[in-house]
Image (spheres, grey):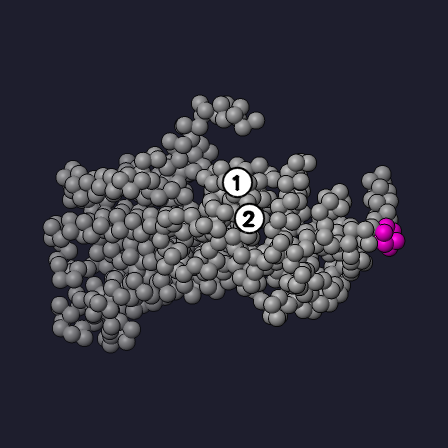
Amino acid sequence: MSIALSCKNIEVSFDGFKAVAGVDLDLSRGEVHFLIGPNGAGKTTLVDAITGLAAYTGSVVKDGEELRGRKVHHIARRGIGRTFQTATVFENLTVAQNLDIAAGAGRSPWTLLRRRRHLPQNVVDTMERIGLADRADTPAGVLAHGQKQWLEIGMLLVGDADVLLLDEPIAGMGHDERETTGRLLHDIAVDRAVAVVEHDMDFMRAFASRVTVLHAGAVLATGSVDEVSGDPRVQEVYLGTAKESADAATA
Amino acid sequence: MKFFTTRAGTWTGFGAAALVLFGLAPLLLSGFRLGLLAQFLCYAIVAVGIGLAWGRGGMLTLGQGVFFGMGAYLMAMHLKMADAEFRGGPGAVPDFMELAGIRELPAYWAPFASPAFTIAAILVLPTAFAVLLGLAVFKRRVKGAYFAILSQALAGAFAILLIGQQSLGGFNGLSRFRYFFGYNLDDPVNQQMLYFIVAGVLLAVVAVSLQLRRSRYGELLVAVRDAEERVRFLGYDAANVKVVAYAVAALFASVAGAVFVPIVGIISPASIGIVPSIMFILGVAIGGRASLVGPVVGALAVAWAQTALSEQFPSAWTYAQGLMFILVIALLPGGIASTAAVLKRIPTKRATVEATT
């Protein structure tokens, strides 16, 4: 199990407010690594920082290369792929077109200016893998909610990302779709590092190989599911916020 | 409609268009009407570019008058130089400069004595300007309404700049051209030749646009239009994708301006400022910005309606124009080009709703 991405002392502040306050995080190939924590813990902001969307101090290293200060598309070309909380696919293009675009960031201008004659083999394979082989010519906009999430993950796979940062990949999915997604995550994590930002604790327990709990922008605990759920500080944070949000709801 | 996406369909479409433009139109229209059509086809060429940049690329280019004007003035400078040379030998000053009391030919006019230099300038200068401007704007992620306002302000500023240039004819612009690359512009045969040139350019421009739309680049451009962030997170520099479409649209507008000048016989700041730029957009919106031929149809329809109605009711044209725009926005948001799709949807709407639930 090798470390694919290493983050050291990441800090992100917005107008003086530290959304992420000194986070260390290592993502390893072969693991489905869950990032959990209450709302505002800094999970998505951390993903934004790693992918170049939010400015930060600290260091993100992949394959010996420092990525801080790089542009979003440079970081993506280094094999770091992300999804968004609301699945973002190209709704007016077909499933095949979506994947073909995702597979082609390195294409020459000459290739781009010509028509696509055949689908690349990795696009065909990926459609099979994400269960959309029979929807190749369907516009992505008419796919079911869960299928869009799979398509977005598939877009990262054809783009040869080996670090995948998935922001709530099962939001709005039914039970069967969650199971399928969980198995898909383990399947793709065999030779990749997969990080999952998630609120769903059942899903986390069922599919996490490692868990990092964030709270108020800092790492509270890291370990296996059992280690983390046995940690008293984690229990306190979750019970505490559960109580607070219950109070807020009644107020 | 599916037929026209096949190879045979494409050739059929182009063949039919060529038949109408090169066969029917010269046969049926008087010289005067054919001249008008030639002028409208210039607008259609601009519209094809806008269709690409706005319809496919999502860039609301409210300032295409800038590029249209660049092409037009570059061509007009050459025509004036050629006329002056014909009258007074090499180094002679164009007539309008003599009237304005300019005795010495400004240095930047001199190269336009060369036809080759002029044609190269028409193709390169506006395109290069669009690339630089596009890089400056899109790399900073200026988009949407901000981009539209910026490009419109540019058109306004460009017109004002030209009004102040006495060596470019100022407010009156450049007019009274006698020869076009050695051909007398008063000769009806040559006027018809100009019509054929502009019709040929239009077909070429549509063909280029079609190739771009069907290429992988065309798919990528739509992707950038619909979800620019997603494209960036897939490893593309989305700004470059937009710059290409913007520059192609600028090139089309420039070429249209260049052929417009010998056909209409005048170019002035009034034909390239904010109002003409909006008229370009209006035609594209009415025709259907996302389709291939929609912008052409819209540009021709608006220009034709303007001419026909303003001949009959000079003061009412503006209302008709507004009404046209409202009707299209309300009933056909996809423009005239979407008529078939909208009609088809009406009876099947219920059935598809049942099928998807």
Q: Quadrant of the C terminus of chain B?
A: top right
Looking at the rendered structure, the secondary structure element under dot 2 is: helix
Question: Which residue corresponds to the image point at 85% horizontal and 51% vertical from the top-left?
Answer: A230
Residue at the disc numbered 1: A132
Looking at the rendered structure, the secondary structure element under dot 1 is: loop
Q: Is residue A196 visible?
A: yes
The disc at residue A154 is: 2
Pick whichever of labels 1 and 2 is earlier in the sequence: 1
Question: Which residue corresponds to the image point at 56% horizontal and 63% vertical from the top-left?
Answer: A78
Question: Which residue corresponds to the image point at 40% horizontal and 38% vertical from the top-left?
Answer: B335
Query: Magenta part of the protein: which range?
Result: A230-237
Q: Is residue B156 visible?
A: no
Question: Label 2 lies in what chain?
Answer: A
Q: Is residue A78 above or below residue B217?
A: below
- Nearest the viewer among A124 and A220 is A124
Distance between the Cα atoms at labels 1 and 2? 10 Å
Report the amino acid beneath label 2. Gly
Q: Is residue B172 above or below residue B327?
A: below
Q: Is residue A9 above or below residue A169?
A: below
Is A60 inside the magenta-drawn segment?
A: no
Residue A70 in the image, given as x and y percentages of width and height: 58, 67
Label 2: few (<14), some (14–19) or many (≥20) C-alpha neighbours in 10 Å: many
- Nearest the viewer among A233 and B296 is A233
Report the amino acid beneath label 1. Leu
Label 1: few (<14), some (14–19) or many (≥20) C-alpha neighbours in 10 Å: many
Q: Quadrant of the N terminus of chain B?
A: top left
